[in-house]
Amino acid sequence: MPRHILVVIGHPDPSPERLCRALASAYADGAERAGHIVRRIDLALLDIPLLRTMQEFEHGAIPDSLKEAAEAVVWAEHFVFVFPLWLGTVPAMLKAFLEQVMRPGTAFAYPAKGESFAKSLLRGRSARLVVTMGMPAAVYRIWFLSHGIAGMRRGILNFVGIRPVRETLFGMVASTSKAKRAKWIGQMRLLGERGL
Ligand SMILES: Cc1cc2nc3c(=O)[nH]c(=O)nc-3n(C[C@H](O)[C@H](O)[C@H](O)COP(=O)(O)O)c2cc1C
């Protein structure tokens, strides 16, 4: 079944040289080739104002520069977030984007009177986090317990109803051979074809 897939490139550096861009493109190309309907959002090309107050979060309008992206978030059935690990977690730009678009009324609803839990409004969607990093991926998993990724998965995506959230980690990117990078690109293309 063709899926609506939203590929979010969460790398603040717009340079085409970045591995994250190549991985995101490979996924999107594979998905399109297999008949999925793909939309891409490149955060480095967007104006993402910092959200500063609870008032803005609950009652403010989504900034004009993010309206199309916010609409794509509701449209998507499957999300692919591709980003580098920065200081152990997601780059601030990606967090700023999520704070703007995962708003009450769109992504979740506060509990009604007498209810204990917020209501997730993006149920039925799935996601994949594709993360590049300088350290070996096993070190991030075992020693750091993937804390930054776990925060995004549990604190943001699961909270608004998106599950399962799968993960693909690419480590030691600075010293990777061309052959290994080509293998990673192929892996992403395959995941795209399968819409996973
Ligand atoms: C500001 C900054 C912080 C970083 N923090 C980490 C980190 O905490 N752990 C790590 O393994 N790599 C870290 N790195 C390395 C990046 O993860 C790595 O350069 C990136 O994944 C390479 O992918 P790219 O070519 O798409 O940029 C950091 C890099 C920068 C620029």
Image: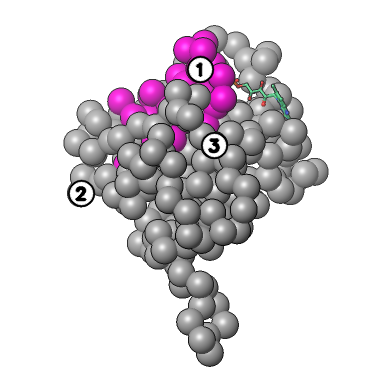
Determine the secondary structure under disc 3. Answer: loop
When asked about the image quadrant of residue 67, the answer is: top left
User: Residue at the spot x=46%, y=69% of the render?
Assistant: 109
Relative to 66, 154 lies left or right: right
Q: Position of residue 93 (x, y in %)?
A: 58, 34
Q: Nearer the viewer, residue 86 or 1?
A: 86
Residue 166 visible: no
Would you call the spot at circle 2 few (<14 residues within 10 Å), some (14-19), or many (20 or more)?
Answer: few
> Label 1: which residue?
14
Determine the secondary structure under disc 2. Answer: loop
Q: Give the residue type that dot 2 points to.
A: Met
Rendered image: mark on residue 24? none
Q: Which portion, as a residue range, is magenta?
A: 5-29
Rendered image: mark on residue 1? 2
Quarter of the rendering occupied by the C terminus: top left
Relative to 39, 132 lies left or right: right
